[in-house]
Image (cartoon, rainbow, N blue to C red):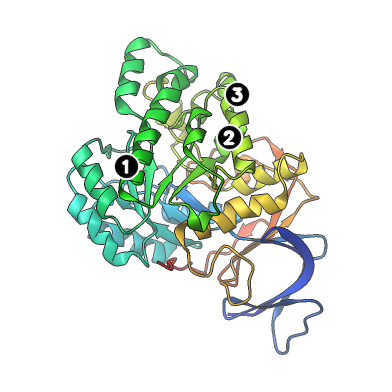
Amino acid sequence: MTPVLIKNVTIVNEGASIIADVWIKDGLIDKIGPSLSPQGNYREINGEGLHLLPGVIDDQVHFREPGLTHKANIASEARAAVAGGTTSFMEMPNTNPPAVTQQLLEDKYTIAANSSVANYSFFMGVSNTNAEEALRTNEKKNSVCGIKIFMGSSTGDMLVDNYLTLGKLFSESELLIATHCENENVIKENKAKYPDADDASFHPLIRDVEACFESSFTAVQLAKQHNTRLHILHISTKRELQLFTNMFPIPDKRITSEVCVHHLHFTADDYAQYGNQIKCNPAIKVAENKEALWEALLDDRLDIIATDHAPHTWEEKQQPYQQAPSGVPLVQHSLLLMLQYVKQGKISIEKVVEKMSHAPAQCFQIAKRGYIREGYHADLVLVNMNTGYAVTKENILYKCGWSPFEGHTFPAKVEYTLVNGNIVYENGAVLDLYRGQRMMFDR
């Protein structure tokens, strides 16, 4: 592994931006300071005019392997991730077969070890009938990110609506429980109201605010009853925000939450342009929800920014609304989208780093990642805040080959991405000879 020296770069870390050098050796950040002059052979990167951020940690992606690899696979989507500055990901269990046994879970780790250019972890999946098997993950609490419960149906048949199962998991899990919260009964009632729904504009009416709130409220009540470490994924409504607090820092919160980039960017008005391209679960809703999500993100009621990256083929998305699958490919452009909001003055670059790097590391207790600190893994991204990046069909790296941002020019650009001190992206190309590491957790 060739050591790397990054010179005269603006380091964005822990609420501050400073200009310094960063010396990277043996995969770790060895030294941070002015005018560093190490000995021996090394690669030097001129960071003047660039910003150095800790690599993004995306706590919710769907990379589709095994079994759904016509849509995506771990290798392809990890390449897209590092091209966008995401150096670590946590992947969901609703594959085919779903990761609902310890062996199937470990099979995914084996695939990633052989194919992922980014660091990785995988959630253990839950069904109505595998509670005992899922709880065996307690034995792996230092090497598995968490347990995922679908309290609302989505891609894959993994809905958990048995309250005995839920009670057992919430009372006995020693790992963080992450939930997809939408109330299935409310959704069914809404579907009956709109039997002839024929375009994506009906989606937020069917998977509505009440469906989200009722399910999230149930999850919070279960967590409070059992003192469970709960993390609610992809919050999409104003009403749900009353369930969360900003009175404590993340290490002291037992209940945390996530917002996804598409819920911060799109509104229901955008279905007219994008249609099924932005059909996702939970649905993108009317503008007042987006405005409230931004307010809660900035005042720390919402803890993490993620993607819920969920690719489907273009042909699948062209089906009629009721047949088209839900999900949006986002991981390659999530950081660029948030940096666009930095340029617009909506959020500071320090806050973006907090929500996309520091907070995931804190929430999941990830060992030595998520910060630019001496002794930490050198997961880093160098961005140019003064050069644009145009999204074209040719530079979209998702296996599905499309993005709702195709044709858009972001006002910032990823120049380099490093994973464990290895340069894995530079000059617009992924250098995928390197393989990432299984993330470990300080629990």
Q: Earlier in the sequence, mark 2 or mark 3?
A: 3
Residue marked by disc 3: 287
Residue marked by disc 1: 222
**Tag 1: residue type?**
Leu
- x%, y% of residue 407? 67, 35
Whether pointer 2 and pointer 1 mark residues with C-beta atoms closer than 8 Å, the reply is no
- Mark 3 neighbour class, 10 Å CA radius: few under 14, some 14 to 19, many 20 or more: some
Which of the pair 160/416 is nearer the observer?
A: 160
Q: On screen, 50 above or below 228?
A: below
Rendered-image quadrant of the C terminus: bottom left
Mark 2 and mark 3: span between their CA atoms? Answer: 10 Å
- Mark 2 neighbour class, 10 Å CA radius: few under 14, some 14 to 19, many 20 or more: many
Which of the pair 258/275 is nearer the observer?
A: 258
Residue marked by disc 2: 293
- x%, y% of residue 261? 57, 40
**Can residue 271 be seen at all in this image of the molecule?**
yes
Residue at x-position 32% and y-position 42% = 222
Mark 1 and mark 3: span between their CA atoms? Answer: 30 Å
Helix, strand or loop at mark 3: helix
Whether pointer 1 and pointer 3 mark residues with C-beta atoms closer than 8 Å, the reply is no
